[in-house]
Structure formats: structure tokens, C-alpha cells
Image (spheres, rainbow, N blue to C red):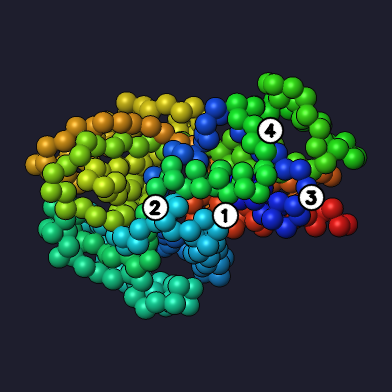
Amino acid sequence: MGLSAAIHLKAESPGLRVVVLEQGVILSGASLRNAGFACFAPPSELLADLAKSNATDVFKLVEKRWKGLLQLRQLLGDSAIGYELTGGHEVYETDGEFERYMEHLPLLNQYLAEIIGKKEIFKVHDGKIEQLGLNGFKHLVEIQGEAQLNTGKMMQAFVQKATVHEVTMLNGVQLTGYTDNPNEVILKTNWKTLQAKRVLFATNGYTSSLLKDLDVKPARAQVVITSPIEGLKIHGNFHFDEGYYYFRNVGNRILFGGGRNLDFEKETTTELDVTKKIQTALEKILAEKILPSTPYTIENRWSGVMGVGSDKWPIVKKYSTNVFCAVRMGGMGIALGTGTGQEAAELVLNSFKS
């Protein structure tokens, strides 16, 4: 999101000097630690959102995610980000769970057809469960339009695009405090004190350490990835339990993540660790339901930090005189980051005109 904003600022106003401060030696947070899902929401997540909010707001956000994916692809190109239109799936463990969601499927498809331009975005295909070798799931819904991408390639493409536009990137620089004066912002960092005419916070899950009054808090997500699996049948994206669990193939490996709902309190953190409770749960589900009777080992584990709040809409606004923010991606940073960054950049550009 920060790189998208920086690129847009320079593209629209080449005379600006734009500097991106990144606290990690390499890109941190969720930038390089997400699961590479180019998605907009499975049925169960949409219905959970509709229980809390009105349909207009819910599907406006879905539209923002869909358009955001198109903006990402247009900006960087499919090849540069490893974009692959694999399709998605949602799987259900019980008949009751499935039936509760299925009665709403025609209405969801009606809304999504207007956004995506295709009929039957969600389509029941229970016979695929056996084909994929899954166990413990009774029902499956296919999701048209979902895709995978290579997170590393995506961020490398963002950095390369920023370099072409002469954006300066400073890695390993952590902001420790700032003062918004009438004509400039003083930035205190672990390196030196900097001055800027405008500052944009695109810090997502790390926002609360500096902008404490915003409705955004960290949400850690843990992931495991397997060794290569000979003859792997699983291909595409998979969700279950309102999106709290998700898995996909990465070549002939399986990436499986989620379980934050098992311990919301401890997962409200910016610490990039993994925990025994959630890792044990992930390993159990992986062995029993996703890869039953399949030999493999867990080759790597990691976590990333999302930004969430009481609402899933991104916060994009002028925060104070010379300070702006674009935060709270709600776990949909790939879909929302590019467009939200551009939206924030426009706010900054307009501030110079007023």
C-alpha cells in the first residue's frame, strides 16, 4: 500500500521527492508474509459480514476488492506478480453449516454478477471433494475469479516500479515518534531526525503504536508450508470457517494458514512468532482433513501481521494538518492495497492544491 501510494505520487507529480520508510531490513509486516491469495471473499465470510452490516456496504467493499485486484494487475502485470487464475473453493464440514449458507447463494451470486460480470460466481460441486483427496468435508462450493500470486515477485515488482519512478526507499528505519507542525512534520527515527512536508502512514497492523486513537489493531496470522508432495491433487485456493482457515497449493506443496479465532487475545500482536496452540491445530487439520494418508513434512512456518478493526473498510483520511493515513486492510491487503494506496496518494496531492 505504501509503495502503491509512492508510485502514484511520483507518476502524478514527478517533481515531488517521495521517500518510503520501511522498518524492516526487508519488507516486513504482511508484505512478504501473506499467503498469496488474490480473492474477494467466500460465501460464509460474506454472510457473516451481512449479519453485521447492510448489503450496500458489504458489496461496495467486495467491489473495492475486485477493482483493487484489477488495479494491481494493471500496475504491475500478471507475469511480474506470478498471477494464476486457479479459481477458489469453500469447503464445509457439516450438512447444517452448508445448508445455512446455501439458501443465500442465489442472492450472493446476483450481487456478485453485477460486480464481476459473471453468473454463478459461487457454484456447488461436492463431487470435487473426492477428486481432491480431502477428508472430513461434506460439501464444496467453487468460486470463479479467484487467483493466486507470488508474494515475493509482487513485492519485487513494486520495488522495481518505485525505483523507475525515482522513489527513495530507506530500509531498517523505524519511526519512533513525530510532531506535526504547521508547515512540516518532524520524524524521529532510530537513524536520524527527518523533516517532511507531508507524511502518509500506510502501516496497517502496526498503526496503533503511533496513531493510537484509530480503530485498527494488529492481527497475527500463522502459516505452515509442506515439503513437495508427489502427485498432489489439490490445485487452487480453499477457505473454510468464515475465512479463518485457508489453504492453497504452491506448486506441489501445500500452504495452510489460519486459526486466529482459536486465540484472538494472544494473536492481537505485532510479534512475528508462531505459537504451539495454533501450530498444533494447523498440523492436525492438515494431516486429518487436507492431506490424509499422504506422506509429507512441514518445511517452514511463519506469521504475518494484518490490520483489523470493528469495521472491514480501510481507513483513508487526513489525520492531522500534514499527516494522512491509509490503514486497516482487514486481511485483504492484496486486493485492497494498490487501490487504497492510490486513493491515499490523491488525498496527499490535493492537500498541496488547497
Task: Residue under label 3, please give it.
Answer: 15
Task: Residue under label 2, please give it.
Answer: 82
Circles 4, 3 touching at the beta carbon (< 8 Å):
no
Amino acid at pointer 2: Gly
Q: CA distance from mark 3 to mark 1?
A: 22 Å
Above or below residue 314? Residue 66 is: below
Q: CA distance from mark 2 to mark 1?
A: 16 Å
Kindly identify the residue that appears in the image at 36 percent across and 27 percent down.
275
Mark 4 / mark 1, whichever is N-terminal: 4
Task: Specify the farthest residue to the left.
Answer: 293
Above or below residue 328? Residue 124 is: below
Mark nearest the camera among 4 and 3 is: 3
Amino acid at pointer 4: Leu
In the rendered image, the quadrant that contains the C terminus is bottom right
Mark 3 / mark 1, whichever is N-terminal: 3
Amino acid at pointer 1: Thr
Q: CA distance from mark 3 to mark 2?
A: 32 Å
Left or right: 243, with 75 as reference point = left
Left or right: 283, with 190 as reference point = left
Circles 4, 1 touching at the beta carbon (< 8 Å):
no
Task: Residue under label 4, please give it.
Answer: 210
Circles 3, 1 touching at the beta carbon (< 8 Å):
no
Number of the label disc, if any, that sits on residue 182: none
The secondary structure type at the circle numbered 4 is: loop
Mark 4 / mark 3, whichever is N-terminal: 3
Q: CA distance from mark 4 to mark 3?
A: 29 Å
Kindly identify the residue that appears in the image at 64 percent across and 36 percent down.
169
Task: Residue under label 1, please give it.
Answer: 338
Circles 2, 1 touching at the beta carbon (< 8 Å):
no
